Amino acid sequence: MAEVEPDEALFLIRQEVSDLHAELPKNDLVVWTAGNVSARVPGRDLLVIKPSGVRYEDLSPAAMVVCDLDGNLVEGDHAPSSDTAAHAYVYKHWPEINGVVHTHSTYATAWAARGEPIPCVLTMMGDEFGGEVPVGPFALIGDDSIGRGIVETLRDHRSKAVLMQNHGVFTVGASAKAAVKAAVLCEEVARTVHIARQLGEPIPIPQSDIDSLYERYQNVYGQRQG
Amino acid sequence: MAEVEPDEALFLIRQEVSDLHAELPKNDLVVWTAGNVSARVPGRDLLVIKPSGVRYEDLSPAAMVVCDLDGNLVEGDHAPSSDTAAHAYVYKHWPEINGVVHTHSTYATAWAARGEPIPCVLTMMGDEFGGEVPVGPFALIGDDSIGRGIVETLRDHRSKAVLMQNHGVFTVGASAKAAVKAAVLCEEVARTVHIARQLGEPIPIPQSDIDSLYERYQNVYGQRQG
Amino acid sequence: MAEVEPDEALFLIRQEVSDLHAELPKNDLVVWTAGNVSARVPGRDLLVIKPSGVRYEDLSPAAMVVCDLDGNLVEGDHAPSSDTAAHAYVYKHWPEINGVVHTHSTYATAWAARGEPIPCVLTMMGDEFGGEVPVGPFALIGDDSIGRGIVETLRDHRSKAVLMQNHGVFTVGASAKAAVKAAVLCEEVARTVHIARQLGEPIPIPQSDIDSLYERYQNVYGQRQG
Amino acid sequence: MAEVEPDEALFLIRQEVSDLHAELPKNDLVVWTAGNVSARVPGRDLLVIKPSGVRYEDLSPAAMVVCDLDGNLVEGDHAPSSDTAAHAYVYKHWPEINGVVHTHSTYATAWAARGEPIPCVLTMMGDEFGGEVPVGPFALIGDDSIGRGIVETLRDHRSKAVLMQNHGVFTVGASAKAAVKAAVLCEEVARTVHIARQLGEPIPIPQSDIDSLYERYQNVYGQRQG
């Protein structure tokens, strides 16, 4: 187990990951302890993640744990989240990704239970996901099958959110905050499209319009992008 | 870019618009940054609106931005909301309107995804909207098609709320507060009528009764009207 | 307009009614200003009710208004709720009732939009309502038809809650608090039975069991009854 | 009625039970006073439970009541919850159980109204419940039929949650906190599976995978187990 010198950069990542966990209950994405956020430590083969089984109101920067990219504990007083191996796999195999979020948010998980992708019938989906939110394989904790399922499914899609069959949602992003945003919007579009479909069929959006929505949003939206 | 002298009237509008944004998350109309409120600056060809991509808890009167009625930035440290052109079009082409609100509130957006107007089967709808909440066209950001769609659809209805197809809701009002109220009530009736229809058909309200409800409510309700 | 001497009893009723209004948003029974609570002033032909069009966070004991049992304003700086005539009719024609609540709570109003009573398929309904929650007539504000519809419908039922067709819920009680409790439980059973029926038919509860539930709950439940 | 000397252990149990009641409204499992938590007093034939008809915000360690395992009041200023006999029966007949929770949480109660078990189609269900959440008999307060129904139904299942027909949910656990967690997760899976089934059939999880999920979660999850 490698010795890690505490330093400012690592402290800031601990703080960011701790703070971002507050978004999960605030946005009704989790109950009890059933969700977690991680971030890559820039320039090191390390990630910071939630400790296992600790409730959101008891989290703090110091309570966060540091793991290597095989999911082994490097620093921390608690065991890492039982989902750490999946997060670690993503960082190890996808260099552009610096944040990962896992939730069992209700409506997204309902789509996952049926193994059905969320069709792109909202401009918000075109903006954020650039198409459907796809379904990944059924996989158990214990080997790399969850992490591999995430990476292999998202490789073929613009979406940074994947519905893992019978399980829940994983989102990835260029930053941990971007992954949290994707988790929030994934649940919102899962809910809205579900409700739309309860009383009929949503109107499809032509692919060329989805392309326009995605291009604009990824390039010009917000204060700091583009 | 015109120089605007800071003055008391403009400060009060900034404050009003900033305060009214708090109603959006409070009433569960938005997630993340996906909604905005604007107000016309009385006696000037200007509007005050939310900056783009800033979260609701970080808003303040000073963070609001001022634009002209073509949607160009006049004053502000941030880029204006990407929906500014639609707001500006409404103010430019509808002098009686002094407030505009845009949300993707869940149930209203679900009706919008099916392109289906909300039928007037609740006395609350008769009171506030005087009939159905209509559907406007599918339109992309980038030209005046969203603004034009709002104005042309609402011109033919008593409703001050319009469901933009596959997109979300725009509401307008004699004040920004009135537009926020319309956004809150639009989501409430969208939800209630959706739920009613899940288990059968709501009973229609005769047109003459809708007329009575609308006349009374617009003229005698509340403390300051009529 | 009769002169009312301010006194301790009246102040306490103002306080109770003001405090109980906080239960409406807290229990998600209302949006904006769309709901109200009233209480009879003991020993006088008066009631205390919410002012019209004022938001819940702006209410205070002093803001409450006092009306006679024909709904006329007796004391207060604001106009009384536009539903005051319906409340007044109930107090005038039903001496045992000391509290009335009106909401447009979502699920109950959805049943009301279909004009369909909520069947008694939950022990909570047997406890609190002793049978179905019935539907009252469609009626407009302007004469005594809402108040009369409430009294005539509830006269034939154990339920202290009535779904007014296409409109919303009125509940009555031996106290204003009891009427608020009935409003809270009415929405809860409206929601639960709605959800149960979305995927099949709830199992009926035999009438003799409903009778047992109602008898026990009305006589032995809680700290101060029976 | 036996005299109980106040002592530290009992005080801590009162505090734990009082604190855990706050989880019920926080997790949207209850309205008004309709739910309760109890804990066994270690080494004594006693339990601590909520007083009847008292609202959650008025609870405190001192307000909790102590009963024997026949449900008789031993210590307390208020009458015990009307569900005390059911809690007491569980403690008397199931020595491994130290905590019991009762709620009418909405989605779980909707399954209970149809008398339909929740099928195990989510990994979260495999983890926590090891299979379906079963249905117990319809039973009235007044004899031991509710308590017996809980124990006899759960004896044949891994699940620590049971849906009592037309009534609500009881959960049991090795601690009161574990029973509260089961109540929170029961409502979450009731909601998610309900929503999944609204638009089609969830994909079954093979029994061998359910077994793997349950074994791992019960043995290695969290900080203090295994």
Image (cartoon, coloured by chain):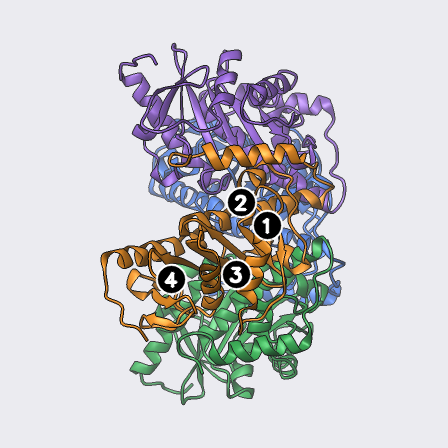
Chain colours: A green, B orange, C purple, D blue
Neighbourhood count class around disc 2 (C-alpha, 10 Å): few under 14, some 14–19, many 20 upward: many
Q: Quadrant of residue D58?
A: top left
Identify the mark at residue D102; answer none if there is no mark: none
Quarter the C terminus of chain A occupies: bottom left
Circle 1 chain: D
- Amino acid type at image mark 2: Leu
* Contact, mark 1 vs mark 2 (Cβ under 8 Å): yes
- Residue at point 33%, 82% (across, down): A9
Tell me the CA gap for discs 3 and 1. Answer: 14 Å
- Amino acid type at image mark 3: Leu
Identify the mark at residue D187; answer none if there is no mark: 1
Neighbourhood count class around disc 3 (C-alpha, 10 Å): few under 14, some 14–19, many 20 upward: many
Kind of element beneath mark 4: strand
* Contact, mark 2 vs mark 3 (Cβ under 8 Å): no
Quarter the N terminus of chain A occupies: bottom left
The residue labelled by disc 2 is: D29
Mark before the other along the chain sequence, 1 or 2 = 2
The residue labelled by disc 4 is: B47
Circle 4 chain: B
The residue labelled by disc 3 is: A29
The spot of residue D7 in percent (x, y) is 34, 39
